[in-house]
Amino acid sequence: MSEEMRMMYWNGPGMSWGYGLMILNMVLFWGLVIAVVVLLFRYLARRPGARGGSGPAVPVAEDVLAQRYARGEIDAEEYHARLETLRGARPPGR
């Protein structure tokens, strides 16, 4: 084998172990990239306020009404009238 061929192929003709390492590194690199994307997606989907997440609940109208009644802003008659209105029943006296 000529000196030129030996320098070109290092260990002789054919594939050397360097190609195997390059393939392994490429598989590990893309596996890491895919894992990071999946973990980032899962993290963002689990954040409060995200769709379907378990973030703080938006107050329901009946809850707001109950809080106003508990604070004394409205009396019992007004509370029950508004509660019936929210639930779709006809208010008393109509």
Image (cartoon, rainbow, N blue to C red):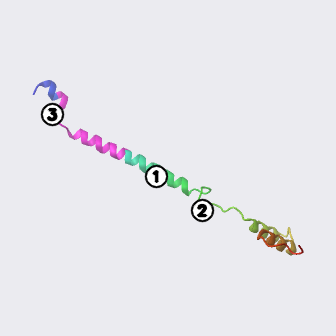
Which quarter of the rendered picture does the C terminus lie within? bottom right
The part of the image, by quadrant, that contains residue 79 is: bottom right
Label 1: which secondary element: helix
CA separation in Å, label 2 and label 3: 61 Å
What residue sits 40% from the left and 48% below the top? 32
What residue sits 47% from the left and 53% below the top? 39
Rendered position, 31 above or below 77:
above
| Residue 59 horizontal/vertical position (percent) | 71, 63
Q: Main secondary structure of the magenta part?
A: helix
User: Would residue 81 be found to the left or right of residue 29 on screen?
Assistant: right
- Which badge, 2 or 3, is on the more N-terminal residue? 3
What residue sits 62% from the left and 60% below the top? 55
On whether residue 91 falls in the magenta region, the answer is no
The disc label shown at residue 54, or none = 2
Q: Residues within 10 Å of mark 3 (few under 14, many from 20)?
A: few
User: Would residue 7 be found to the left or right of residue 60 on screen?
Assistant: left
**Tag 1: residue type?**
Val
| Residue 67 horizontal/vertical position (percent) | 78, 68
Residue at the outermost right position: 93
CA separation in Å, label 1 and label 2: 20 Å
Which quarter of the rendered picture does the N terminus lie within? top left
Q: Which residue is mark 1?
A: 38
Label 2: which secondary element: loop
- Which badge, 1 or 2, is on the more N-terminal residue? 1
Rendered position, 75 above or below 18:
below
Rendered position, 24 above or below 61:
above
The disc label shown at residue 61, or none = none
Label 3: which secondary element: loop
| Chain part drawn in magenta | 7-29
Q: Which residue is mark 3?
A: 13
